[in-house]
Every structure is written in structure tokens, then in C-alpha cells.
Amino acid sequence: MSDAETAPGDIDRETLVDALETYGEDAQIEQTIEECAELIQALYGDDREAVVDELADVRIMVAQLSLLVGEDDVDRRVGEKLARLEQRLEGAHDSARTRGESA
């Protein structure tokens, strides 16, 4: 694996694999849960920098989980969910235009 290879979000894949191998899958899953909890707490506060910091931690952990469960599966599902969001947005935009025309 070369240094040029990246994982989701352009995070160095080698570093992610090293973390998974060093700490183990179960520990990294627990760490992901902890980082998500810290992000939730940061979102309740007013400190933008804390949110950015916790988002970075979560992004790294999610990239590790993507390697664990299969990047292709995750990427496929993200594509499906984005397509569904686009459909919902089109419906919302159509509704807004209809309401605007009725006024």
C-alpha cells in the first residue's frame, strides 16, 4: 500500500489501517462511540472550534469503520441516500414554487 492511497475523506489509509491493527477493531468501535458522544456535546454548545475538532475526530473514526465494514458498501449506500435526498429536495422546491405562485 503506497502513501498516496487514501481512504474516505482523503485520510491516509495506511494510518487508518495501522490504528485498526494496533488498537483492534473493538477498541476502535468504542472510540468511535466516544467521539460521536463528544461531537453531540459540542453541538449543544456555542464553541464552533470544539465542533470542528470533534467533527475531525468523528471523520477519522468513521473512515476506519468504513474500512471495517467495506468501503464499497458504504459508498454505494451514501450514493443511494444522496439520490433520495435530491428527490426530497426537488419535491420541497416544487412545493415552495407552488406556494409562491398561489400567493
Image (cartoon, grey):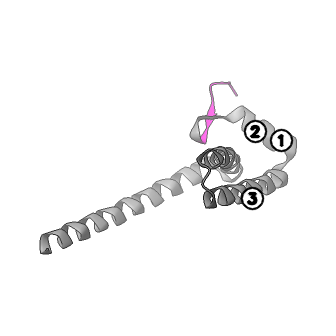
Q: Identify the mark nearer the N-term, 2 or 3.
A: 2
View extreme (bottom): residue: 102
Q: Position of residue 9 (x, y in %)?
A: 58, 40
Q: What residue is rendered at 68% in x and 54% in y?
A: 69
Looking at the picture, which amino acid does disc 3 mark?
Ile
> What are the residue bounds of the magenta stretch?
1-8
- Within 10 Å of disc 1 (Cα), the crowding (few <14, some 14-19, many 20+) is few
**Which of the pair 17/41 is nearer the observer?**
41
Q: What residue is rendered at 79% in x and 36% in y?
A: 18
What count of labels does the image hold? Answer: 3
**Which of the pair 56/45 is nearer the observer?**
45
Is 83 situated above or below 8? below
Q: For residue 76, which numbered disc appears in the image?
A: none
Q: Do callouts 2 and 1 mark residues in contact (Cβ within 8 Å)?
A: yes
Q: Could you tell me how far apart the alpha carbons at marks 2 and 3 are, in whole angstroms? A: 18 Å
Secondary structure under tag 3 reads: helix
- Within 10 Å of disc 3 (Cα), the crowding (few <14, some 14-19, many 20+) is some
**Which of the pair 99/7 is nearer the observer?**
99
Q: For residue 33, which numbered disc appears in the image?
A: 3
